[in-house]
Image (cartoon, coloured by chain):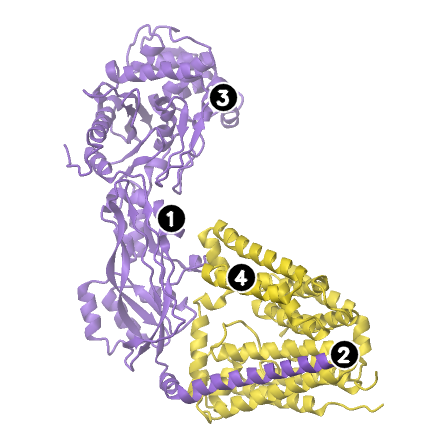
Chain colours: A purple, B yellow
Amino acid sequence: MDENIKKFKFLRNVIIGTAIIIIIASIKLQVIEGKKYSRLAEKNRIRQRYITASRGKIFDRNGIEIANTRPGFYVSVIQSMIDNKTLESISKILDIDKKTAQDKFKLEKNPFMPVKIAHDISYRQLSIIEENIDDLKGIEVGVEPLRNYPYGELLCHLLGYVGEITHQEIKRLQGYSINDYIGRMGIEEHNENQLKGNYGIEFVEVDARGREIGKIAEKRTIPAVNGQDFYTTIDVVLTESVAVYLEKYKRAACVCLDPKNGDILVLYSKPGFDPNLFVHGMKKKEWEILNKAPDAPMYNRALMSCYPGGSTFKPFVALAALDANMITPEKTFKTCTGKYRLGRRTFKCWKKHGKLQLSGAIIHSCDIYFYQLGAFIGIDTIVSRISALGFGKLTGIDLPGEKKGLLPDRAFLEKKYGKNWTEGHIFNLSIGQGDLLTTPLQMACAYTAFANDGEIVVPHVTKTDDYAYHTADISPASIEIIKEMLAGVVASGTGGLARLDDYVVCGKTGTVQNPHGDDHALFIGYAPGDAPDILVCLVMENAGHGGSVAAPAVGKIIRTFLNNTRVTQYAKED
Amino acid sequence: MQKKTNFGIIVAVTVLSLIGLLMVFSTADLYTLIKQTVWLVIAMITAIVLSRIPPRFWSNIAPALYIGAIILLLILLLTQSSYPKRWFKIGTVAIQPSEFTKFATVVFLASYLAARKKMKRFSDLLVPLVIIAMPAILIFLEPDLGSAQIFFPILLLMLYWAGMPATKIFIFFSPLVSAAASFIIYVWVAYFIGLTVFLYFHKQLNDFIYGTVSNFLAGLVMPLVWNLLKPYQQERIITFFSPWVDPRGMAWQTIQSKIAIGSGGIIGKGFLSGTQKKLEFLPLRHTDFVFSCLGEEFGLIGIILTTLVFAYLFYELLLLTRTTKNRFSSIIVAGVLAWLGYQTFVNMGMTLGLLPVTGVPLPFISYGGSSLLACYMAIGVCLAVSRSKFKY
């Protein structure tokens, strides 16, 4: 019983103590600070505000900023204070749709929270608003960090852009305020969590006109956490050179990577768009024009466009044949006369090549040799030997939106054409036409099998030391043979215009027929031949012959890179 | 034997309920007031009925009551599709099972503890912990952190009252402190040294071994596990466990609540004339934040009076626990005291800005039928105890 009395006394004191704490806290609020709170209550002078976090910067491989932030002026609205007239006049000043602004701030549950309705307003707009701020009840103007892309269009597909968060996203995602931007496309989308940071909240006291008098010393202020910086493998100087070399052409895609480790040096697609435009908040019409433009500027051709590989695919057919031990390099087929008849159809070659061995057929890109080679080894051999090189699969690059392409196999052809698909389909596949679809990135990765002795890199734009490879189960001897032939293509064959004085360049040309116009010009090449530092895959849409248009451009890109690799600042060369 | 109903408890509860009706009328509309009045009548009748049932009855049906409550929570979690899964909606009436689970759990835990006379070893703690954890976790999953947290103080006080030494209880739960302290290494080292010294003078080898090892492991494992998580996972956990970090309205509510109470001054702005609540600055003003409106309209005087009535009620309950000879009855009243007392403190502390915002209603005053009914059921049982306290 003694113990019970002890416990009773203890708990009695807890009750008394707690009551005293509550009463003291009330006295503090109501008596000591009573005046302050009465003043605040008088006209609810406390305002809460989101603090925008600064988005992390993005750097190229040499430490050059390729995405950063700059200050900009915003306009925000406090729902509970704004009236219809003010909303109308502010919409007029900002040249925005009244309804859009309304939809935006209606999403914020707290009617006293300022919601941004316009970003990056001009000095002119700012001065008009400031002049009339007394009449614009419920309108606030302030400075915020905005995304800035110093290279504009050059890196648009790679970096992506940031846009205002949508209604759906704010409901679906955690950790965003209605005032936030969200990354779309490219690195901005893929690394959103790292780059975005976290918004904060502050409490300020305002005067009767709604102007800030000062911050409230309230422990509950939550500071914004800025986003983390992001380091890429991109070489922005090289990308600039690529853009210069492709200046005359309308639509093109270029992938440069380090075949040793998969570092993407250049990921360039043309035409592009200016990602800085999205920071303002794009109008629906502007967006539609951009999104529906016939040249599809929003589309990252380097990893989304699927092209038939054309003749750049031939080395893989040859590799399959050698690896399966079905031919030797000395193998010959029927003489190339420029035409080959299969049943009632005639398959053509671009030139009369005469009698060729395998090396000649690759170096001079003879279609008729490859029709016969393909038919000789059969579709199953081709597919089974080379699918490990990544055809019809994602490369696994750390960017969103990559397309898979298609390597047609027997099952696919049977499904598409029925039981009676013909040898003609194998003919088409053998020269990289027909149903074959590859992305420039996929092709570049597949060629690292030659540059890297059978190891195919997993491409990446994130700077890392942790490289990944797929190993293709292909005999080194076969790869060695094809490598020599690829050197031959540049030294004495169709790729002659990619030749450099100081370095051995290996590569393959491709000219892809397409129903929509002129041929696409392709060239994939790497250098120096024995220990390559760079591999370039270039696709120029409707530009003509791979050998005459793409090969010289790739030669220039490789030269620029190899000659300037130790110089950070590089001057534009013709 | 004499039968004596405890009038102190009845008066206190009636006064609080009337204050509740006044505040519901002040903060909400007539319809809400009528609903609350109907609930109050039902609750009072229930309490009167329960006060006639001898406590032994509860001891007999405790397991069934408890299992029924758990099943109800499971059904709620599995069948309700709207989120959060806190209510069964029957027409316009929403029933909140978590409130009744508190009652069932207190009764069941009391019956378990009453059957065990010696409460000296750690193993005696494990079963009570499981009894409490099951409903707490289910409610936590709804998710309703506010209601789930109530179970922990209930466990502590009932164990304490059942005879478990406070030092034992502390040592048993000390790894939780260690895990929390481990985020700041200096705090943890200081805590651990302090704990070791305490355990050394405590002079019990088993306690010493358990205390040091478990605290050391908790302090070691917690940061490791934490660092394994991805940053966004950490962020989510922080937001989940500390709603006051979530900026969407929480900090806003606290500030508005403080403004409401502070601007009330000593005598208040008068009934029905609170400006903060009228302008709808205060969210949830008839449920979780009803105390802020009370402070605004009736000032310091209103707050002190309400606090004193609550303190008196809890003192009466405490007195009842002590004077009751029957072990089961005594422990059950202790459980009710922990439940209502802790809930009152957390709610008031939240509105005064002393504690984080967690959705906990103020017993007898906040609008909400389930809460009111559950509280009155508990009071009914306490009254039954008081009537029969000289019987045994």
What is the quadrant of the N terminus of chain B in the image? bottom right
For label 1, the residue is A189
> How far apart in space, not on screen, are marks 1 and 3 (Cα)?
35 Å
Q: Amino acid at mark 1?
A: Glu
Q: Amino acid at mark 3?
A: Ser
The disc at residue B329 is 2
Marks 4,1: beta carbons within 8 A? no
Helix, strand or loop for disc 3: helix
In the rendered view, tell whether residue A377 sits above or below residue A173: above
Q: Residue at x 36, y 41 (%)?
A: A462
The disc at residue B192 is 4
For label 3, the residue is A384
Q: Amino acid at mark 4?
A: Phe
Badge 4: few (under 14), some or many (20 or more) residues near its Cα, within 10 Å? many
Q: Residue A34 placed where, x, y %?
A: 40, 88
A397 with respect to A493 (left or right)? right
Q: Are marks 4 and 3 on the same chain?
A: no
> How far apart in space, not on screen, are marks 2 and 3 (Cα)?
79 Å
Numbered disc 1: what chain? A
Q: Amino acid at mark 2?
A: Ser
> How far apart in space, not on screen, are marks 4 and 1 (Cα)?
45 Å
Helix, strand or loop for disc 4: helix
Q: Are marks 4 and 2 on the same chain?
A: yes
Q: Residue A94 placed where, x, y %?
A: 25, 65
In front of the other: label 1 or label 2? 2
